[in-house]
Amino acid sequence: FIANERGYGEYNVQFTADPAIPNRILQTNFWDYAVDLVAFDLDPVTGIVTVPSQMITMGDGDDYEVVGSGTYDPCLGTMVVDFQGDVDGTHEEYRPGSVKSSKGGK
């Protein structure tokens, strides 16, 4: 998938289904910099996505709180999420595909 972060640009991420929690997906490469996976909970009835509060480690070794909410369209495979916590103000738009090269972190 392509993540397009307002003010930063596009970079590649991957989503996988959480094997233990229904309707949860896990994202790699959050912020084009994270070491840990970020969990997203999808509500198939309302199209709402919730990023529960979680601590993740970034590429600099520091921990950050990530929390957010938004919407997704399962037919188009798109998602829009606004984040709070230590990454407050981050606005991400996700769509299927990939970019040729990633910027390599913040």
Image (cartoon, rainbow, N blue to C red):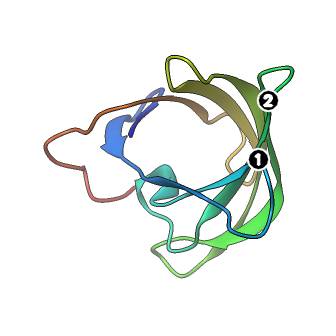
Residue 83 position in % (x across, y down): 72, 39
Q: Where's the C terminus, which quadrant?
A: bottom left
Q: Secondary structure at mark 1?
A: loop
Q: Secondary structure at mark 2?
A: loop
Q: Residues within 10 Å of mark 1 (few under 14, many from 20)?
A: some
- Give the residue at x 59% y 27%: 79
Please determine whether, in this image, residue 79 is positioned above or below residue 66. above
- Give the residue at x 55% y 18%: 75
> Where is mark 1, residue-wise?
23
Q: Is residue 93 left or right of residue 100?
A: right
Residue extending farthest to the left is 100
Badge 2 or badge 1: first in the primary sequence: 1
Residue 85 position in % (x across, y down): 80, 50
Q: Is residue 10 left or right of residue 21?
A: left
Q: Where's the N terminus, which quadrant?
A: top left
Kind of residue sitting beneath label 2: Pro
Q: Residues within 10 Å of mark 2 (few under 14, many from 20)?
A: few
Please determine whether, in this image, residue 26 is positioned above or below residue 99. below
> Where is mark 2, residue-wise?
44
Residue 13 position in % (x across, y down): 41, 50
- Give the residue at x 50% y 17%: 76
- Give the residue at x 48% y 61%: 28
Asked if marks 2 and 1 touch (Cβ < 8 Å), the reply is: yes
User: In terms of depth relative to the viewer, which is nearer, 25 or 104?
Assistant: 25
Please determine whether, in this image, residue 71 is positioned above or below residue 19. above
Please determine whether, in this image, residue 6 is positioned above or below residue 62. above
Q: Is residue 26 left or right of residue 4?
A: right
